[in-house]
């Protein structure tokens, strides 16, 4: 059996210091205008540009190199009658990995936003609004993986230098040359039932509905039917992925009560599924070496399921209810009680090994939480 180890030949210059200068200048204009159509209606327009600098970990000098291997084991039958079976195993090389964040000159993410909204105030305590928005995002900091066969210096049996042509997989974040778009609208309303008699006039409702349509063609993901490694240096783009952490539909409904020293609310929030990542640990390519693996769990009907690397990871649709109560004893002392996730909703995630095919991945329980706060003013 050959024993090979990675090394750098002394004096060859394989290890060199890498120094870069990093900086950027961006002009971020903003424009807002309001038209008072009447005493009860307001029309607003807004346009702006903003930026988000890259993560420090993606531009500082760091990284690691490792070898991906697979362990194989087999049981051989006894060589003689009545003998014991023999367990044999071998570790086989797959490819080299370079998980590299060394001095990448990532550009800041640029976001251009345009909004238009119409607000209507028919009476005191009542508001209705509709808002349309559009965002263009460029220079995203996105995970990228590529492969190349290149000469690699090795030591055979710890002593003899050899050079082999080995497959290398490079994992790093890069500035995407493909932009993303986010567009949608939100409608909402709030009112108090002040036409009711006595203490009932303190009741009110607040609600909103949001629709978002987004496209993020620069995000890379693996279709398991295309194999466990990039082909031609890039991942297949079979997926039509939205922007991260954005649900197509979300809604909020809130029952309120406000009268004198008492404030009370019950809020219910729901969202449809949303894309979390295409390289989330432990579904990341670096964590699994590009190979599917079996997850054992008590939440699956079969007790286990297959997990795949670098496939889209989604948060499933879910709804959460929160309750809050405030009481002001005087201008100097008040208390606040709150309860979150009253329905004890489970947060579930799904993987998408093929476009349009979703399988369970994990389930999280955040539990109900109760908080009491006392505030004193002197």
Image (cartoon, helix red, strand yellow):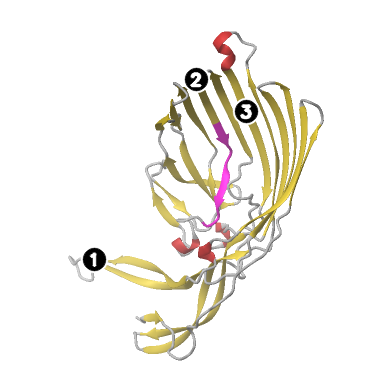
Residue plotted at (58% across, 58% down) = 221
* Residue labelled with disc 3: 207
- Asked if the residue at tag 1 contacts the one at tag 3, i.e. Cβ–Cβ closer than 8 Å, the answer is no
Taking depth in this image into account, of 334 and 229 the one nearest to the observer is 334
Horizontally, residue 28 falls left or right of residue 227, namely: right
Rendering coords of residue 285 (x, y %): 49, 62
Residue plotted at (53% across, 28% down) = 267
Q: Earlier in the sequence, mark 2 or mark 3?
A: 3
> Where, quadrant-wise, is the N terminus in this rendering?
bottom left
Could you tell me which secondary element the residue under label 2 belongs to?
Answer: loop
Work out how far the residue at label 2 is from the one at label 3, CA to CA, in angstroms.
24 Å
- Asked if the residue at tag 2 contacts the one at tag 1, i.e. Cβ–Cβ closer than 8 Å, the answer is no
Taking depth in this image into account, of 14 and 358 the one nearest to the observer is 14
* Residue labelled with disc 2: 261
Disc 2 versus disc 3: nearer the observer: 2
Residue 8 to residue 282: above or below: below
Magenta-drawn stretch contains 323: no
Is residue 310 something one can see in this rendering?
yes
Q: Residue furthest front?
A: 378
Taking depth in this image into account, of 259 and 73 the one nearest to the observer is 259
* Residue labelled with disc 1: 85
Residue 111 to residue 299: above or below: below
> Where, quadrant-wise, is the C terminus in this rendering?
top left
Work out how far the residue at label 3 is from the one at label 1, CA to CA, in angstroms.
69 Å
Could you tell me which secondary element the residue under label 1 belongs to?
Answer: loop
Q: Earlier in the sequence, mark 1 or mark 2?
A: 1
Disc 1 versus disc 2: nearer the observer: 2
Could you tell me which secondary element the residue under label 3 belongs to?
Answer: strand
Taking depth in this image into account, of 362 and 70 the one nearest to the observer is 362
Q: Residue furthest right?
A: 37
């Amino acid at each position: 059996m050959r024993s090979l180890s990675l090394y750098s030949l002394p004096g060859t210059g394989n290890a060199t210091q890498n120094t870069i200068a990093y900086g950027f200048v961006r002009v971020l204009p903003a424009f807002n205008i309001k038209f008072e159509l009447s005493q009860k209606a307001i029309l607003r327009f807004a346009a702006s540009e903003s930026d988000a600098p890259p993560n420090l970990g993606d531009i500082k000098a760091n990284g690691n190199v490792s070898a991906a291997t697979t362990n194989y084991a087999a049981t051989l039958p006894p060589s003689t009658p009545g003998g014991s079976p023999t367990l044999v195993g071998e570790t086989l090389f797959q490819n080299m990995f370079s998980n590299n964040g060394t001095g990448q000159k990532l550009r800041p993410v640029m976001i251009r936003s345009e909004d238009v909204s119409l607000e209507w105030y028919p009476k005191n305590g009542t508001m209705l609004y509709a808002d349309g928005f559009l965002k263009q995002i460029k220079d995203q900091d996105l995970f990228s993986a590529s492969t190349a066969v290149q000469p690699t210096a090795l030591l055979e049996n710890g002593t003899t230098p050899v050079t082999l042509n080995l497959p290398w997989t490079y994992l790093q974040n890069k500035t995407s040359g493909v932009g993303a778009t986010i567009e949608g609208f939100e409608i909402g309303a709030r009112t108090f039932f002040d036409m009711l008699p006595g203490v009932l006039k303190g009741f009110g409702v607040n609600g909103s509905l949001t629709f978002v349509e987004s496209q993020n063609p620069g995000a890379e993901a693996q279709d398991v039917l295309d194999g466990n490694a990039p082909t031609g240096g890039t991942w297949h783009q079979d997926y039509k992925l939205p922007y991260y952490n954005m649900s197509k539909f979300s809604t909020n409904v809130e029952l309120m009560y406000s009268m004198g020293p008492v404030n009370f609310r019950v809020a219910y929030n729901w969202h449809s599924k949303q894309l979390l990542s295409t390289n989330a640990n432990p579904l990341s390519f670096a964590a699994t070496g590009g190979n599917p693996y079996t997850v054992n769990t008590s939440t699956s009907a079969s007790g286990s399921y297959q997990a795949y690397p670098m496939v889209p990871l989604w948060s499933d649709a879910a709804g959460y209810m929160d309750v809050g109560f405030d009481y002001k004893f005087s201008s100097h002392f008040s208390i606040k009680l709150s309860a979150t996730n009253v329905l004890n909703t489970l947060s579930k995630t799904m993987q998408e090994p093929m476009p349009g095919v979703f399988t369970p991945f994990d389930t999280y329980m955040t539990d109900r939480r109760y908080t009491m706060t006392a505030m004193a003013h002197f």
